[in-house]
Image (cartoon, rainbow, N blue to C red):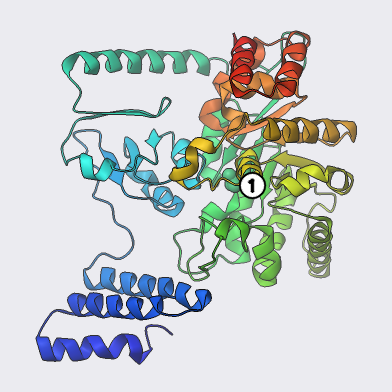
Amino acid sequence: MILDDPQLSEAPREMIASEHCNAEWALKTHTETLVEQFEQFEDAYLRERQTDVKQVAERLLKQLLGQPGHQPPPARHDVETILVAHDLSPADLIQFKPQQYAAFITDVGGATSHTAIVARSLNTPCVVGLHHARELIREEDLLILDGEQGVLIVNPDKLILAEYKLRQSEWELERKKLKRLRTARANTLDGSLIELHANIEKPEDIVDARENGATGVGLFRSEFLFLNRDELPDEEEQFEAYRAAAEGMEGQPVTIRTFDLGADKQLKGVERVANNPALGLRAIRLCLAEPQLFRTQLRALLRATHYGNVKILIPMLSGVAELNQTLHFIETTKQSLEDDCIPFNREVQIGGMIEIPSAALAMNVFAKKLDFLSIGTNDLIQYTLAIDRTDEEVAHLYDPLHPAVLHLLSRVIATANKFNVPVSVCGEMAGELAYTRLLLGFGLRQFSMFSAQVPSVKQRVLTTSLPEIATLTQKILRAEDPLKIHELLDRLNA
Ligand code: PEP
Ligand code: MG
């Protein structure tokens, strides 16, 4: 509609005729004028609409320039190429998968943004939020990027280069050794079995999950299947994707999360502009507002339950009314499948993500009504501390060890255990070695992380005795001073 609006299309035509400039220039100049006009609106909502115009104009410009979509420079094959960008969306990264960049660097973004998460799942080092990387780095510069420490070195001298080459080979050696743990069970020293599951984005990721010894899929972020597309996937296509994941895990659990769209993951064609996208129509809220979209996905998911151990996970639940509405929706979808005589597992387990403080604080109702729970620490931290996880300006305040976060975590795990409801952590904390023992000490027995993190977390589990860590974990929970918390954590991990 915006494209058809004479407000956008007529002025550039006139400009081309009168000034003999090219179409791109005419469009760019006119868009700037339009944006200035939007800026004058007093109404914030109308002012915001300038983004729609800008997006349409940008897409049109790309078409005029013969660059449909985001096309990064092709990765070279003779050297390992690092992509340096102002910003990359999760959809951009997913698209780069086959191109195999050696690493990504962005000026903006936070370490638990979905961009960083996808980079991790591609097993590709990534440092985000570097502010001026694009200004300071030149084409052909030699870069060292240490994704673990978040360090970037531009044009290192010989000594530093040699040092990092050594570290790289040591790291690769260590990874190979860890892979030998693939088939070992993740038992603590005192004999408790810990489930280590994988987070995946596409059915193909199952291969990695199995190679790294994951005993199930704890989080399949289904929305990633369908970014970068012009049309919504139909039931059949979704069903095939979910079935492939279910069959690929050969009976081991595959927890598929319903679409968590909105905020930093937008579906083409249903992009929305909100003042606070992370607090807006995201995840289950969007699904309940778009019943057709939700019904199609639920039918596909339920059908896949016939082909493996599929569980359904609902993201971003905040209260009981939303939970009831969702459960009712699932029930009516089941009935529609029965009416169509399509087989599915009626007893499919339905779980909820605990990632909003309200859900963490009012846990009992979720524990009573759901079959399992999964703690999304990325969002739980974001919403508890009011830190936008995609905003590099506040990234330093994003703190998994904040006493408020620790209290919420231990409380959710304890309540779930009290109600005998399986609970896992599937946020980034689950794959970070620094927190493995802490979470075990809180009573967690199920972790879900990127496949590549499974072997090192398993090794940490194998060297942990639950009775030995109990006292220190409680001390960490009682500590108030951040320095003290870090000191105690170091002792726990020593
Ligand atoms: C989380 O919030 O911790 C989580 C696992 O979900 P996502 O990162 O996709 O929001
Ligand atoms: Mg989340």
Residue drawn at 40 percent across, 48 percent down = 93
With respect to residue 330, does 110 lie above or below? above
Q: Is residue 351 visible?
A: no
Q: Residue at x 69, y 59 (%)?
A: 284
The quadrant the N terminus occupies is bottom left
Instruction: Provide the secondary structure element on which disc 1 rests.
Output: helix
Q: Is residue 39 visible?
A: yes
**In the depicted structure, whether residue 183 falls above or below residue 93:** above
Picture coordinates of residue 415, whole percent (x, y): 85, 34
- Count the numbered circles shown: 1
Three-letter code, disc 1: Tyr
Residue visible at 18% across and 28% down in the picture: 155
The x and y percentages for residue 77 are 22, 37
> What residue sits 51% from the left and 18% below the top?
179
**Residue tagged by mark 1?**
383
Q: Residue 338, located in which quarter of the rendered image?
A: bottom right
Residue 30 is drawn in which quadrant? bottom left
